[in-house]
Image (cartoon, rainbow, N blue to C red):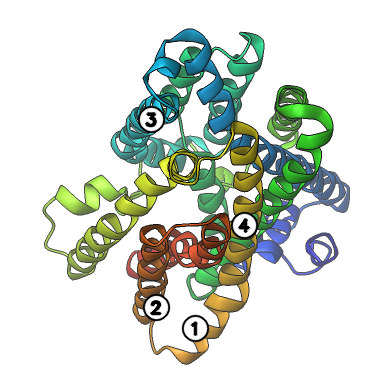
Amino acid sequence: AILAQGRQGAGGCGSRLIGAMSGGGRSPPLAPESQCGHARVRLAGTMVALSVAVICFGIIVPMLPEVQIEYFRRATDCRLSGETACASQASTAYGITQSLSSLGVLLLSPYYGKHSDSHGRRPFLCAGLFAQVLPFLALCTWNKDVRLFYVFQALAGFAPAPNAVLFTVVADRASPTKRLQSFGCGAACISAAFSLGAGFSALLQPLLGAGGLLRASTFTAVAASVVAMVLLPETLPAGNQHEQPRVVRSKSLARILVVPDSSRNEELLRSIAAVGLLSLLPEAGTTTIALFYAKARLHLSEQEVSLLGAHMLCIVGAGGFLWQTVGIAGLRRLCPSTLWVYQVALVANLLHMLGYVVLWAPWVLLLNAAFAGGPLAQPTILRGLVSEALPA
């Protein structure tokens, strides 16, 4: 549909392709048909490459607890302290790593947002993709030494976040009234690819083993990311590059929360961002340690944890896809405002968190994963709220 609609309209080829994907928007002057055909091929190749990379990440993530626990059992004396000691150490180390990574995102988002407005999206997306694959490449290259994985994973948070840049690409071309729908479609594609990868992980782990599957998926993700970097077109209009930053600049959660501003819209955004922070912090922390907790609580082996994680993330991705497509579209028709849609997502988040409290069997964890679509939809709805308040 994207490639077909690229032939229509009065806009340039890059604008028409992105506009077809994101709901339409302003278009630069008409580009020659030969350039449009070239842009269509580049965009199609980029989308395929990014989808392959996300599928590979979906394969890798369920195996990370097993790799980390095995390392601590091999490199420390945790195995002498009890059955769950190695899982506890791995959970603590991984939690600290993710906290440092999140701190980098919080601090540097305004800087990257401002400079991508004046220098284009492509260099920031390429840098973010490279930072995402580097930790897994280090994990495979240095014989599953998770210390380097932790270092590169923490540093990845200080690079541009690829998902944030991707949604900025959508916002460049989508009209304000279509942005929530466009954000939902983009997030749904990511969820579907991740769910597919987790399903492959559950099927292939018994055949290839964690080590072989980890290496194959990592090198495939690296290759797909390189292809995406090469083919990725620039979506920021050429006239906007190297200009002075706009009056309304890219916003980060940190800026919305702490920077005084008399704007009524920004006061509303500050309140919404505070609610989002309070609701997503427990979710992010619990998700980081969920599989380690399941191993300790349910007395599972490392291989069983990997398979359980693969099944769980497959359900999570499927739930995210349904929420981002059918859920948001249906709620948008029933609810008078986007803020009400966000409140429904908060209720789903509460139900999801309660599932961890009553965990006593693997099937409870899998059932709880079905409620994860609500938390996954929250960032999309928040982007829609920000877009409505700050349409520039």
- Circle 1: is it few (<14), some (14-19), or many (20+) Cα within 10 Å? some
Residue drawn at 55 percent across, 84 percent down: 330
In the picture, measured across the screen, residue 205 lies left or right of residue 358, that is right
The answer to whether residue 209 of the structure is visible from this angle is yes
| Nearest to the observer: residue 336 or residue 194 | 194
Q: Secondary structure at mark 1?
A: helix
Residue 391 can be seen, yes or no: no
Q: Which residue is mark 4?
A: 317
Proximity of marks 2 and 1: CB atoms separated by less than 8 Å = yes
Q: Choose mark 3 or mark 2, whichever is in front.
A: 3
Q: Which residue does the numbered mark 2 point to in the structure image? A: 344
Where 156 falls versus 147 (above or below)?
Answer: below
Q: Looking at this view, is 145 or 334 the one in front? A: 145
Instruction: State if disc 2 and disc 3 touch (CB < 8 Å).
Output: no
Q: Which residue is mark 1?
A: 331
What residue appears at the point 47 percent right and 62 percent down from the top-left corner?
Answer: 380
Determine whether, in the image, residue 93 is placed left or right of residue 178: left
The nearer-to-camera label among 3 and 1 is: 3
**First reached walking from the N terminus: tag 2 or tag 1:** 1
**In the image, residue 320 above or below residue 224:** below
Using the image as rendered, state which of residue 367 and residue 54 is in the foreground: 367
- Mark 3 or mark 2, which has the lower sequence index? 3
Residue at numbered disc 3: 88
N-term-proximal mark, 3 vs 1: 3
- Name which residue type carries label 2: Val
Type of the residue with mark 3: Ser
CA–CA distance between discs 3 and 1?
Answer: 40 Å
